[in-house]
Image: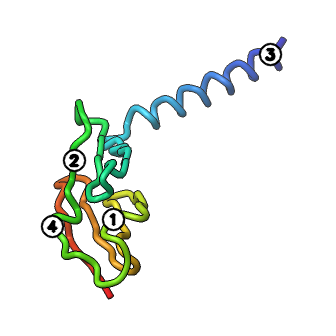
Amino acid sequence: MTVKILWFAAVAATVTLGLSAVAKSPFPKEQARVVVSRDGRAIEIQRTSDPAPIRVPVLDRCDAPLVGETRIRHTKLTDESVIVTYGKHCEANVDLKMLAIKCTRCD
């Protein structure tokens, strides 16, 4: 009987500590979903705070690549930005909070 009561107390304490740790998180992580547009010149970002996806025209902002097709080949989502690879060796960063485009490098 004593073992059952101690086990119940330990389980209740664990569940309570787990829930309070989740509830105390001051800034929940911003989840985002990234999709390349049909034409391959822009990405569409939908954050949890946005009601609809937002189109970010990456290739309209950055110059056309010297080598390779003028379309987005790969996207990588990080905690604070999206790294977009286009052409053969060109990259751009899109900030998730401000949706600012920064053309970082192009060979």
Question: SS for tag 3?
Answer: helix
Residue 31, compared with residue 41, is above or below; it is above
Report the disc number at residue 55.
Answer: 2
Q: Residues within 10 Å of mark 1 (few under 14, many from 20)?
A: many
Three-letter code, disc 3: Lys
The residue labelled by disc 3 is 4
Q: Amino acid at mark 2?
A: Arg
How far apart, in angstroms, are the residues tagged by discs 2 and 4?
Answer: 13 Å
Which one is in front in this view, the residue at disc 2 or the one at disc 1? 1
- Vertical placement of residue 65 versus 52, above or below: below
Q: How is the image coloured?
A: rainbow
**Looking at the figure, which quarter contains the C terminus?**
bottom left
Where is residue 88 shown, x and y percent of the image? 40, 78
Q: Amino acid at mark 4?
A: Arg
Earlier sequence position, callout 1 versus callout 4: 4
Find out whether the residues at labels 1 and 3 contact each other: C-beta distance under 8 Å.
Answer: no
Residue under label 1, please give it: 71
Asked whether, in this view, residue 82 is left or right of residue 9, the answer is left
Which residue of the protein is positioned furthest toward the top in this rendering? 1
Asked where in the image residue 98 lies, by quadrant, the reply is bottom left
Residue 68 coordinates in the image, percent (x, y): 37, 77
Instruction: Tell me which numbered mark, 3 or 2, is placed earlier along the sequence.
Output: 3
Q: Nearer the viewer, mark 1 or mark 4?
A: 1
Residue at the image point whose x is 83% and y is 20% from the top:
3
Indicate which label's residue lies in the foreground, 1 or 3.
Answer: 1
- Residue tagged by mark 4? 61
Where does residue 25 sit, x and y in percent of width and height? 37, 40
Q: Residue at x 30, y 41 (%)?
A: 46
- The front one of 69 and 2 is 69
Q: Position of residue 29 (x, y in %)?
A: 36, 45
